[in-house]
Amino acid sequence: MRRLAAGLASLVFFALAATACSDAGPSNSGQVSLNFATQAGPAAARGTALGVVSTPETFTDGTNTLVISRVELVVREIELHRVGVTEDCASGVGGDCEELELGPLLVDMPLGTPGATRSFSVELAPGSYDKLELKIHTPSASSDDAAFLQQHPDLVGTSVRVTGTYNNGPVFTYTANLEAEMEFELNPPVTASETGATDLTLFVNLDGWFRDAGNALINPETASPGQSNESLVQQNIQSSLRAFEDEDHDARDDHGTDHP
């Protein structure tokens, strides 16, 4: 199973009522928060202030050095899948998926910040959920993306954008038009109740993005659309994501030993 700024201003807070895949909404609801992280760190108290300024992250293979100063992802259709249901959320069948955010949503990753940073919190129907599903989405001139592109016209045709330097060279901007449906198992399932809140973290391992099969760093310019490493880096991006329950916001799975 695949494990899924102008600063953190783009991590806007949403107070959206979660809507089931069917038209019916929950009469009683719990709450779930979705957090993003690139580094594990110390536990943070619930409700800790989240206005943290991102700082560049540096990666090396002993010969080459990559400095990443900004990472932006466009995601949409973030949904939780109820335990015991065979259909996936993308099928649109039944009413057993809870929609957290329809999007498109621009995520400005919290670089250089140990621990998880909250993006948004929503209500959802009480129950147990065993999968988180989302799409990495390339905005187009379609009506569904019109409002998003009014705010971010420079992201038409772009789902991933990375800014940084390679071997102290000039600043590069890597872009990708990656379209991918991501599904993350939550084991054990997370339980939403009417009396508590649940925290999930989407962890992105940036260290693996611009590396070849031998773990050597590659020049991000060789991964741009049409270049030799385009497919390699897009596959690396997809395999770098994980999702898990993270009540203490330390960017580690609360129930596992396979920590980032």
Image (spheres, grey):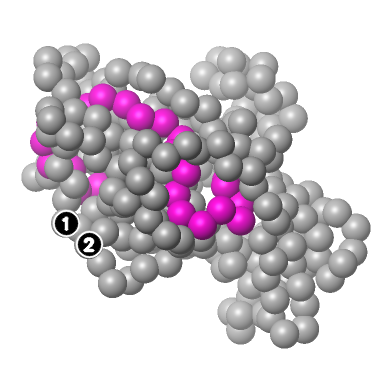
Quadrant occupied by the N terminus: bottom left
Residue at (81%, 66%) from the top-left corner?
166
Q: Is residue 64 above or below residue 182?
A: below
Quadrant occupied by the C terminus: bottom left
Query: Disc 2 designates what residue?
Result: 255
* Horizontal side of residue 161 vs 172, given as left or right: left
* Horizontal side of residue 58 vs 64, given as left or right: left
Q: Are marks 2 and 1 in contact (CB under 8 Å)?
A: yes
Chain part drawn in magenta: 108-134
Q: Amino acid at mark 1?
A: Pro
* Horizontal side of residue 260 vs 113, given as left or right: left
241 vs 259, nearest the viewer:
259
Quadrant of the rendered structure where residue 194 is? top left
The alpha-carbon separation of the residues under discs 2 and 1 comes to: 7 Å
Query: Disc 1 designates what residue?
Result: 188
Magenta portion: prevailing SS class? strand
Residue at (60%, 31%) from the top-left corner?
10
Q: Amino acid at mark 2?
A: His
Residue 254, percent from left and from top: 26, 59
Q: Nearer the viewer, mark 2 or mark 1?
A: 2
Residue 83, percent from left and from top: 12, 44
Residue 212, percent from left and from top: 63, 75
